[in-house]
Amino acid sequence: MSSTSRELHIKKAIDELRQRPDIPETERLQFRGHFQTFEVIELPLDVPILNARSFRIAPLLADHPDRGVVETDPESPKAQAIVTDLVRKSHRHIDGLRGSLESQGQAQPGVITRSGKLINGNSRCVLLRGLVAEGKIPASTTIRVAVLPGDTDNKEELDLESVLQQQKEFKDEYNLVARLMMIQSLYDNGMTDESIAASLRVDKAADIKRLREVLVLMNRSRSLTADPLPLSIFVTVEDQQQNWIDLLKEVRDIENLYGREPADEHIRGWLIAYFSGHSAVHQLRKAKGDWITRDLVPHLAEAGRDGDSITQTLSAEETSTETAAPAAAPAGLDLLDVDSSESTPASSSVTQRVLDLVVKASQDPEREFAMADGTSLTGQEIKRVMHGSVAEGLNNAAQRKKDANRLVRPQSSADSAASSLKSLVEALEDVADDPEFSPRIDDLKTTLDLVQSRLEEVLSIVADIKVPITNDEENGE
């Protein structure tokens, strides 16, 4: 059907609706900053054009080999067939929606432009067409849609879709990746973080900015494997927004101190845990420091025959450059939960090989992977072994960090106290000549007496600690 025919169908349906003696159906939508009432019409299922720019399918479309076809001519039969397939794949509760449409019909109207593009209701249209093709519902079935004004522009369409996606029809809100792509698209089309936050009912514009940065982090993360990953690989059934926000903060901290490559190494370790099936927030927060070489690899080597096969395979892929003497790590890196071997080529390479294997196993669980010892393991078997070894490695890393924190806590606390006393000196110098401060001096002296008492207690404990005598001291050297 041509675009002209679609427009005529919609115009005719509106004219017929307005001539009806009964009260027609309407739909209230938040549009152009306030709620407005729109007329709802019925259209044959072949009239609407599926929205090729829908945020719901954006993650899958971004990785599709025929993406160019959709972008160049979104209304062509081939493009619409691709969009139809992606709509089916992107809805995480497609069977529930299909069953409801078959038994109860369409409950909620979609939203359509005057030119026939569906802004909301793409999944319903696709499923209704499928049910007709299967003979499950009459061929005369129509789709109910609220019609937008003829002067609706692209920015307003994007804004409206962002509002409509808040509705939890069949409990299938946009997945995290689609939501992030939607936010970035709104921003690219001229909306500020403040206006996006208001549209999505987010409290702070800073939260929107952070989510846009999470999308950048996702794209960075998927480039860290031997073969770049599709963005859709981060689409999960459960929303994992907090995981990515935590990772974003950790990457920023490491990058500010040590640069991009140490931060990339941290991401690789995080991804190993993520793709091994440990995606809960409390699990991923353990994936810090040099846990791959110190905690994961030893457990992997002891994980039975399959673990030994994987370890041999990873070792067989080493090159001569990986056995070179390790470079010195920046001082204090281990105390900051940064991989102390990040500047070591061998360690970095081990992390890379583990990540590449875990990702390939996750992407193709039925594939047979040849091992260095002549055996083979399926992707599912590799992931099973990795899941157990990673769990033990993460727990070991967390315990090691806890033990290390116990030993460094006295010095850290002393450093903090020294810093606070320095700030106190500066604050006193600032108010020493201010008459208004005089009434407060007695309270300050009381607090300083307590500080002095604590300091004497600390010095007493330190004086009683026995320092081990070295061999050189025993020999009088």
Image (cartoon, rainbow, N blue to C red):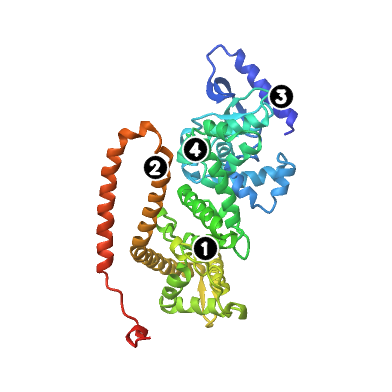
Q: Which mark is residue 8?
A: 3
* Residue 238 x/y as whole percent: 45, 49
Q: Nearer the viewer, residue 154 or 427?
A: 427
Q: Is residue 239 above or below residue 6?
A: below
Q: Amino acid at mark 4?
A: Glu
Q: With 359 as the anchor, is 405 left or right in this view?
A: left
* Res 283 → quadrant: bottom left
In the rendered structure, which disc, 4 or 2, sits on the residue that comes first in sequence? 4
| Amino acid carrying mark 1 in the image | Ser
Binning the other alpha carbons within 10 Å of mark 3 as few (below 14), some (14 to 19) or many (20 upward) gives some
Residue 422 vs residue 203, the one in the foreground: 422
Residue in view at x 59 percent, y 63 percent: 225
- Circle 4 Cα neighbour tier, 10 Å, few/some/many (<14 / 14–19 / ≥20): some
* Residue at the disc numbered 2: 428
Residue denoted by label 1: 362
Give the distance between the C-alpha atoms of the residues marked 4 and 2, in whole angstroms: 76 Å
The first of marks 3 and 1 along the sequence is 3
Tell me residue 17's x, y (percent): 60, 17
